[in-house]
Image (cartoon, rainbow, N blue to C red):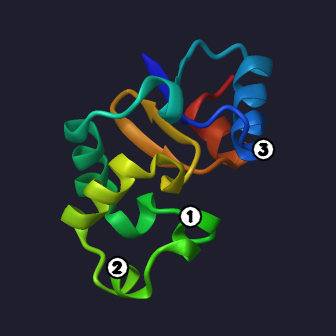
Amino acid sequence: MTTIYGIKNCDTMKKALRWLDEHKVTYRFHDYRKDGLERAQLTQWIEQLGWESVVNKRGTTWRKLDPEIQATMNNETAVEILLEQPAMIKRPLLDHEQSLTLGFKAEQYQAIFPS
């Protein structure tokens, strides 16, 4: 089963979803805002990928964080903050056969889902 996580109105998400549709990949879309997040799942992502990869440091939500929180971020604090602010999670997050891929690049998806 393939699940793609993100926020529906994100431009990068739209590109990834369009690519999956065009290549007839069967997937389930999980919207962080609408469907929520489980602490255990988020903890697993951070343990597997590292909080530095999971947190979108280019977004406005990160930039609005207190600089002290940014400077002292670690796996535990990242889980707490991302549960409160799921828009800070880098998107899309693709879970295919228990392998996680962050972001969208057509070449990367082509390697995951060869025709």
To which quarter of the image does residue 20 belong?
top right
Residue at 74% x, 18% y is 21
Query: Does residue 64 show up?
Result: yes
SS state under label 2: helix
- Measured as percent of width and height from the top left, residue 72 is found at 28, 83
- Residue type, mark 1 in image: Thr
Q: Is residue 90 above or below residue 50?
A: above
To which quarter of the image does residue 81 belong?
bottom left
The residue labelled by disc 3 is 11
Residue at 23% x, 45% y is 44
The residue labelled by disc 1 is 61
- Measured as percent of width and height from the top left, residue 89 is found at 48, 52
- Residue type, mark 2 in image: Ile
The residue labelled by disc 2 is 69
Q: On the picture, is 84 further left or further right than 108?
A: left
Q: Earlier in the sequence, mark 3 or mark 2?
A: 3
SS state under label 3: helix
Residue 97 or 50: which is nearer the viewer?
Answer: 50
**For the residues marked 1 and 3, what is the alpha-carbon distance in whole angstroms?**
17 Å
Query: Does residue 59 show up?
Result: no
**For the residues marked 3 and 2, what is the alpha-carbon distance in whole angstroms?**
28 Å
SS state under label 1: helix
Residue 91 or 87: which is nearer the viewer?
Answer: 87
Q: Are marks 2 and 1 in contact (CB under 8 Å)?
A: no
Label 2: few (<14), some (14–19) or many (≥20) C-alpha neighbours in 10 Å: few
Residue at 59% x, 12% y is 26
Q: On the picture, is 16 further left or further right than 67?
A: right
Q: Is residue 42 above or below residue 90?
A: above
**For the residues marked 2 and 1, what is the alpha-carbon distance in whole angstroms?**
12 Å
- Residue 52 is labelled as none
Q: Is residue 28 above or below residue 79?
A: above
- Residue type, mark 3 in image: Asp
